[in-house]
Amino acid sequence: MRVCKFFDPQSGARVGLVEGDAVYDLTALDKERFASLAAFLELPDRVGTLARLIRSGISIAPYSYHSLDRQPHEDSPHLLPPIDRQEVWAAGVTYLRSRDARVEESESGGSFYDKVYVADRPELFFKSTPHRTVGPNASVRIRGDSKWNVPEPELALVLNSRRELVGFTIGNDMSSRDIEGENPLYLPQAKVYSSSCALGPVIRLAETVDHPLEMQIRLMIRRSETVVFQGDIALNQMKRSFEDLVDFLWRDNAFPDGAFLLTGTGIVPPDDFTLQPGDGIEIAVEAVGVLKNKVEG
Ligand code: DO4
Ligand code: MG
């Protein structure tokens, strides 16, 4: 079962139910329960509520998912990032591949990455706000003062204010490796800037995924028509459990509208690779879909 956010020029931002190629405007069906993504996340029985709606027959005409899955333009309906008022956080060094890449790029040797990989306390950092986050088919950015940039394809946990795992989506933790490698204190600048985070294309409700750790993440980067990098990783290669990451995120922290937690990358392009304007980034997780973005040119 999947939900999305989409934009309609007549009615604005909507919460949608995705059923195959049909997208039903939940906000039109019930302006209170589906007023916003935040309202949906807080519903007590989301899967049951949507299942009852589907069983009773939805009387409104659906949008076609394919027609929404297009470059955002204010004159036509399109998918939005599945976020409204939530903060986006991210975990780091949760895969061996990430630990090794961080140690190699670090000008100071990076022993703190070795330490955090095995420590009880994970690396968690503030990644994005809704206004810095882009959705499907929109452009992500690379910083003007950086020369070494990569996408970080990550499974994102979608959590409500009660700390319940509502669903999964795909996150791209765009990163400036030269800035991060120069000094660990520069991490917020390497990670947090306009359009440095992409989310989407939809949220897959967690109760409808039988074996989350069997999911795979795939990354493909195209330059013109050529695939210049591809890689994949299984979620079961992650060093930490979802529960462990969420437990630390919630310590002494409240998230009144819920939160997104990117769970770290296990796919790192070779050190001589950097993104260029115009590159196409595709991140796929079968249970969720494919998040496609272009690097702003
Ligand atoms: O410590 C730097 C951040 C690492 C990260 O974002 C990741 O492993 O995904
Ligand atoms: Mg990351």
Image (spheres, rainbow, N blue to C red):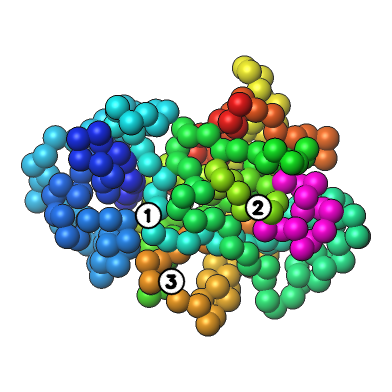
Q: Position of residue 292 (x, y in %)?
A: 51, 34
- Identify whether 275 is placed above or below 29: above
3D distance between C-alphas at marks 2 and 3: 21 Å
Residue on which the image places disc 3: 255
Residue 267 spot, x, y in % from top left? 69, 46
Q: Which of 66 and 14 is in front in this view?
A: 14
Distance (Cα) linking label 1 and label 3: 13 Å
The answer to whether residue 145 is above or below residue 189 is: above
User: For disc 2, does the CB lie below 8 Å from ligand 1?
Assistant: yes
- Determine crowd level at label 2: few under 14, some 14-19, many 20+ residues with C-alpha closer than 10 A: many
Whether residue 212 appears in this view of the structure is: no
Residue ID at (38%, 62%): 166
Q: Are marks 2 and 1 in contact (CB under 8 Å)?
A: no
Residue at which label 1 appears = 84
Q: Are marks 2 and 3 in contact (CB under 8 Å)?
A: no
Where residue 252 appears, as percent x and y from the top left, is: 53, 82
Quarter occupied by the C terminus: top right
Tell me the element at label 1.
Answer: loop
